[in-house]
Amino acid sequence: MPFSFALLASTAKAKPVAACQRLRPFSSLVTPAWLRESDRTSGQVRVIDCDSPVAFQRAHIPFATSFPGFSATNLKDTQGGTGVVGPREFQQLVQLLGVEKDSTIVFYDDAMGIGATRAWWVFLHYGFPKENLKVSELLTLREGAPLKETGKLVGLEAVQSALLRGTAEFVDSRTPAEYIGAQANGNRRVGHVPGAVNLDWKDAVSAEGNGRFKTKAELEELVHQRKLTTNLDQPLITYCQRGVRAAHTAFVLHEILGYRDVKIYEDSMRQYLNRDDTAIEH
C-alpha cells in the first residue's frame, strides 16, 4: 500500500520530532522516512491505520493498528451519523486502541489524509495534547473520568453568532459546484454560508498524485488567491457536508499555515442547508 503521510498526535521522543521539523516545518506532520526509522516494535510509537477495515486487511504498515469497529473517517455519533462521536464511545475507542505508556500516536491513511486528519482533529477536540500525550492522560481516560471538550468542533448556534457579529471567517471545504449551488448533494437547499471562502480540500493536496500536502509556500499562495485573510489571529470556521473534509482543511490552516483559532462546524451543510432559518448565498 503506498504510504501517504502520517499525523503526529503526541510525542514523547524529542529527537526524531526535531529532525522531522527541520525537514518539514509542520508541528504535527511526520514524513514516511521518520516513520520507517521509528521503533514500532517497543510500543513507544503507535501507528493507527485510518482506512476502512477492508483496506486494512488488504495491506497496511507493519505493526499498525486498525481503528476498531468503525471508520476513522467518520468518528460520528453511531445513532444519527451526525455530530462527533460521544465521550463514552470515544473513551471506549481509546481503550480498544490500547495506547501504552509514553506512546507516540501516529495516524495515517491512503486517501490523501481525509481519515487521518479527521482522527487527529477529534483526538485534539477531546483534549489530547498535540505535542505531549502523557500516560497520566490515558490513565484518566481508563479510570472513566469525564472527558473535556475543547471547542474545536462547534454547532449551529456558534455559526449563527459568528455570522451575526462578524467574529469569524468561514472556509467552505466542498467542491466549487457545491459551493455555488450547482450540486445539491442531497440537501433541500443549495449554496454556501454568506461570505465564505471556497477552499476545496483537495486543492491542498499535491498534484503529483502522491497524496501529500502541498508545500507551505504553495498553500500560502492558494489562500492568497482565494482571498482568505492573512491575519493568523483571525478566527476561522471550516465546514463541508458532514465535517470530514472540513477537518482536512482545518488541519492545513492550523498546523501548516499557522492560523491560531480554527474550528470546525461539525454538522456542516447536512444541517445548515436543510433548515429554513439559515442564511445562504449562491
Image (spheres, helix red, strand yellow):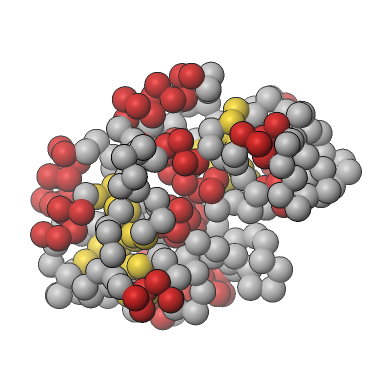
For residue 64, what is the image quadrant?
A: bottom left
Image coordinates for residue 224, horizontal then vertical, percent: 46, 19
Task: From this view, report whether residue 32 is shown above or below residue 178.
Answer: below
Task: From this view, report whether residue 211 is shown above or below residue 228.
Answer: below
State how many labels appear: 0
At a point 43% along the width and 76% down the height, the residue shown is: 54
Image coordinates for residue 274, horizontal then vertical, percent: 81, 49
| Residue 153 seen from this side | no
At a point 59% along the width and 31% down the height, the residue shown is: 198
| Residue 86 seen from this side | yes
Image coordinates for residue 196, horizontal then vertical, percent: 64, 29
Quarter of the figure with the C terminus: top right
Q: Is residue 63 left or right of residue 256?
A: left
At a point 73% along the width and 28% down the height, the residue shown is: 194
- Residue reaching furthest right? 276
For residue 207, what is the image quadrant?
A: top left
Comparing 10 with 50, the one in front is 50
Image coordinates for residue 222, horizontal then vertical, percent: 44, 25
Task: From this view, report whether residue 202 is shown above or below residue 88.
Answer: above
For residue 128, what is the image quadrant?
A: bottom left
Quarter of the figure with the N terminus: bottom left
Task: From this view, report whether residue 280 is shown above or below residue 224.
Answer: below
Q: Is residue 130 left or right of residue 225?
A: left
At a point 59% along the width and 51% down the height, the residue shown is: 243
